[in-house]
Image: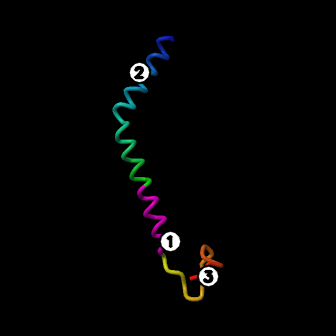
Amino acid sequence: MTMDIAGEVILAALALRVFGRDAVVLLRRLAAAGVRAGISEMRRDLPKGAKDPHHEGQAS
């Protein structure tokens, strides 16, 4: 292992140690926002007379 590669590995490990927890928190918040957006999309009201393509052919 050359000194350049060793330096880059150490720098990457240090960056992961410093920013790892923040990255995980950010990813969890993005996932939660996606779930909220999906639920909002499922709950929106359709105009009168419009057919819901997701529920066509299903018994009510």
Image quadrant holding the C terminus, namely: bottom right
Q: Secondary structure at mark 2?
A: helix
Location of residue 60 with respect to 12 vertically, above or below: below
| Residue at point 49%, 80% (across, down) | 45
- Label 2 packing within 10 angstroms: few (<14), some (14-19), many (20+): few
Q: Assess whether residue 39 is covered by the magenta stretch.
A: yes
Q: Position of residue 23 (x, y in %)?
A: 39, 42
Q: Which of the labelled discs sits on residue 13, or is there none?
A: none
Residue at the spot of label 1: 42
* Dot placed on the residue nearer the N-terminal end, 1 or 3: 1
- Label 1 packing within 10 angstroms: few (<14), some (14-19), many (20+): few
| Residue at point 45%, 60% (across, down) | 35
Query: At label 2, which amino acid type do we have?
Result: Ile
In the displayed orientation, state which residue is furthest to the front: 59
Where does the magenta region start and end?
32-43
Query: At label 3, which amino acid type do we have?
Result: Lys
Location of residue 56 with respect to 16 vertically, above or below: below
Q: 51 or 23: nearer the eye?
A: 51
Q: Which of the labelled discs sits on residue 51, or is there none?
A: 3
Q: In this rendering, would 4 be left or right of 51?
A: left
Q: Position of residue 22 (x, y in %)?
A: 35, 42
- Given this view, does label 3 or label 2 mark the residue nearer the observer? 3
In the displayed orientation, state which residue is furthest to the right: 57
Q: Which of the labelled discs sits on residue 10, or is there none?
A: 2
